[in-house]
Image: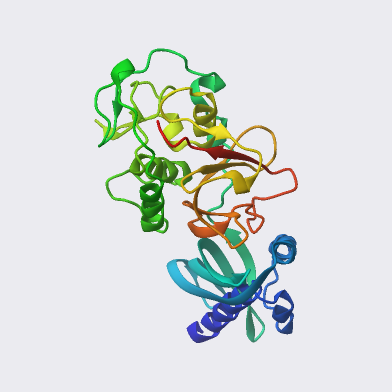
């Protein structure tokens, strides 16, 4: 029995992988019966293929490694497993070869159908859409204009008005982003929704000064768990709050909103509002550029490295999606 359902899982992973190169090839053997998944995937693949054409991209090779993380159900008639899919896409644009990585987590339900096994259900365990956390804002959406409290970083001395200007080391922020895109730095708490925690770590690695207030709705700071209590600012860990802080601050960690993605630099930040309703739900950092000068980004939660910035390959994306393109200044 195990050999049979594992063969079905192998076929599914192969089809999942192949659709990034040639979507039509998977029609040769249809083993997925989850209609909602198939509809969502067909829309996503349409966006991907249209994106290839618009960008002048030619996919060369796609590889997907599957790892069973946990068995939820195991019987002669049904198998439910949590699976990690680590994908790598190789493509060419403008004569340059680019490599994109992503990690997805899915709960796959397979059932016996006569003498064969089929994939009856596919659930995305982790997505970029996080509606609950997006409702938390920096000081309820208001700009904080009080006197700054101490700024901390390895190369920042003093605090308040006496603080020393410091350069944003973009290359160090990017190096950190590439080092930890697919894992968690054990020096920091890892969250179930980890995208903004990861971005904040990258910014700090680049020299962004901590603004400690002791109030979770103010400043930008992290202390970890203190006496069993969560002790970090919302802006450190929540996309919506980080967006408010970056766009409202006039000193310390801040950003200028730009109109076009090609205006961004390495180490800049893109924050995503999937529904276009003003609540931001996902954060990424610019870590590279394609041959056309468009940004490629890293992210956590759904771990991604050098992914095309517009995220039209995400199940969270829709036509209402809006972006906040944020350029971090060269000097804090």
Whether residue 191 is visible, yes or no, is no
Q: Residue at x 43, y 23 (%)?
A: 251
Q: Residue at x 40, y 41 (%)?
A: 203
Q: Position of residue 192 (x, y in %)?
A: 44, 46
Judged left or right of residue 171, residue 5 is: right
Q: Position of residue 12 (x, y in %)?
A: 60, 76
Q: Position of residue 50 (x, y in %)?
A: 75, 63
Residue positioned most to the top: 146
Q: Residue at x 59, y 37 (%)?
A: 280
149 up-or-down from 43: above or below: above
The C terminus lies in which quarter of the figure? top left
82 up-or-down from 268: above or below: below
Q: Residue at x 75, y 47 (%)?
A: 319
Judged left or right of residue 132, residue 322 is: right
Relative depth, front residue between 301 and 3:
301
Q: Quadrant of residue 111?
A: bottom right
Q: Position of residue 197 (x, y in %)?
A: 42, 42
Judged left or right of residue 125, residue 152 is: left
């Amino acid at each position: 029995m195990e050999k049979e359902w594992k063969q079905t899982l192998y076929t599914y992973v192969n089809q999942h992988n192949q659709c990034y190169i040639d979507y039509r090839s998977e029609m040769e053997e249809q083993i997925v019966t989850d209609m909602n998944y198939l509809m969502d995937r067909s829309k996503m693949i349409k966006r991907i293929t249209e994106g290839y054409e618009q960008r002048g991209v030619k996919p060369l090779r796609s590889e997907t490694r599957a790892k069973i993380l946990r068995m939820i159900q195991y019987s002669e008639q049904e198998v439910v497993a949590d699976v990690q899919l680590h994908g790598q896409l190789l493509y060419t644009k403008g004569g340059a070869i680019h490599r994109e990585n992503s990690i997805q987590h899915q709960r796959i339900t397979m059932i016996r159908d006569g003498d064969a096994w089929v994939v009856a259900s596919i659930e995305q365990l982790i997505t970029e859409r996080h509606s609950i956390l997006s409702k938390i804002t920096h000081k309820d959406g208001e700009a904080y204009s009080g006197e700054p409290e101490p700024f901390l970083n390895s190369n920042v001395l003093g605090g308040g008005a006496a603080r020393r200007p410091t350069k944003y080391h973009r290359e160090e922020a990017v190096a950190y982003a590439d080092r930890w895109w697919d894992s968690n730095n054990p020096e920091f708490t890892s969250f179930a929704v980890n995208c903004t925690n990861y971005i904040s770590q990258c910014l700090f690695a680049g020299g962004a000064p901590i603004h400690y207030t002791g109030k979770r709705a103010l400043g930008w700071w992290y202390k970890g768990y203190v006496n069993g209590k969560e002790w970090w600012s919302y802006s450190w860990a929540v996309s919506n709050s980080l967006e408010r802080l970056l766009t409202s601050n006039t000193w310390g960690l801040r950003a200028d909103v730009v109109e076009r993605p090609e205006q961004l630099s390495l180490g800049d930040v893109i924050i995503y509002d999937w529904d276009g309703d003003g609540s931001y739900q996902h954060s990424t950092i610019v870590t590279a550029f394609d041959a056309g000068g468009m940004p490629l980004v890293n992210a956590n939660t759904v771990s991604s490295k050098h992914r095309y910035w517009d995220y039209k390959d995400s199940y969270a994306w829709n036509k209402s999606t809006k972006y906040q393109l944020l350029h971090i200044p060269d000097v804090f």
